[in-house]
Amino acid sequence: MVRVQVLMQEKEREEFRSLAESSGMSLSAWLRRAGVAQADRQNQARRLGSPEALREFFNKCDEREQGHEPDWQEHETVIQASQRSGDSGT
């Protein structure tokens, strides 16, 4: 572990401390969780930010999943049958 000093306004510190306390966390743990969440959001956006990255994502999904993904015509047939019967299937 390393220690990091963060400079902020007193008002910000009190707001963050209050939010941390209401979550049952220390200010340090709350700030760390907020930083990790922000990094995850930015990394996710960056990972899928190009056509190549998106293609790679779908290729990995295809490799991981088993079975057959129905084509649109199959989906449409199920939707129409459900509409005719009034059954949502769920």
Image (spheres, rainbow, N blue to C red):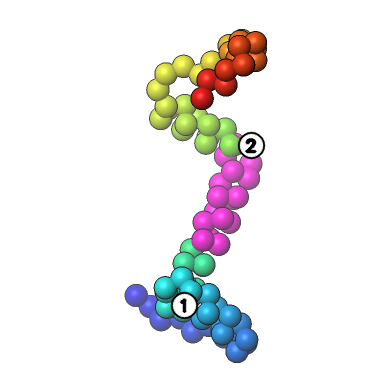
Q: Is residue 45 above or below residue 75?
A: below
Give, as a three-letter code, the residue at label 2.
Pro
Image coordinates of residue 61 in percent, x first then y, are: 47, 31
Q: Nearer the viewer, residue 77 or 58?
A: 77
- Which class describes the residues within 10 Å of circle 1: few (<14), some (14-19), or many (20+)? few
Image coordinates of residue 84 in percent, x first then y, are: 65, 10
Q: Is residue 29 left or right of residue 39?
A: left
Q: Quadrant of the N terminus?
A: bottom left
Q: Residue at x 50, y 29 (%)?
A: 59
Q: Nearer the viewer, residue 35 or 56?
A: 35
Of the numbered discs 2 and 1, the one sitting upstream in the chain is 1
Q: Which residue is mark 1?
A: 21
Extent of the magenta region: 37-53
Of helix, strand and loop, which one carries label 1? helix
**Per the image, is 46 magenta?**
yes
Q: Is residue 8 left or right of residue 65?
A: right
Q: Residue at x 47, y 26 (%)?
A: 62
Secondary structure character of the magenta stretch overall: helix
Front tag of 2 and 1: 1
In the displayed image of the protein, which residue is found farthest to the front?
Answer: 86
Q: Is residue 72 left or right of residue 66?
A: right
Q: Residue at x 48, y 63 (%)?
A: 36
Q: Which residue is mark 2?
A: 51
Q: Residue at x 54, y 15 (%)?
A: 70
Query: Can see residue 64?
Result: yes
**Marking on residue 75:** none
Image coordinates of residue 21 in percent, x first then y, are: 46, 77
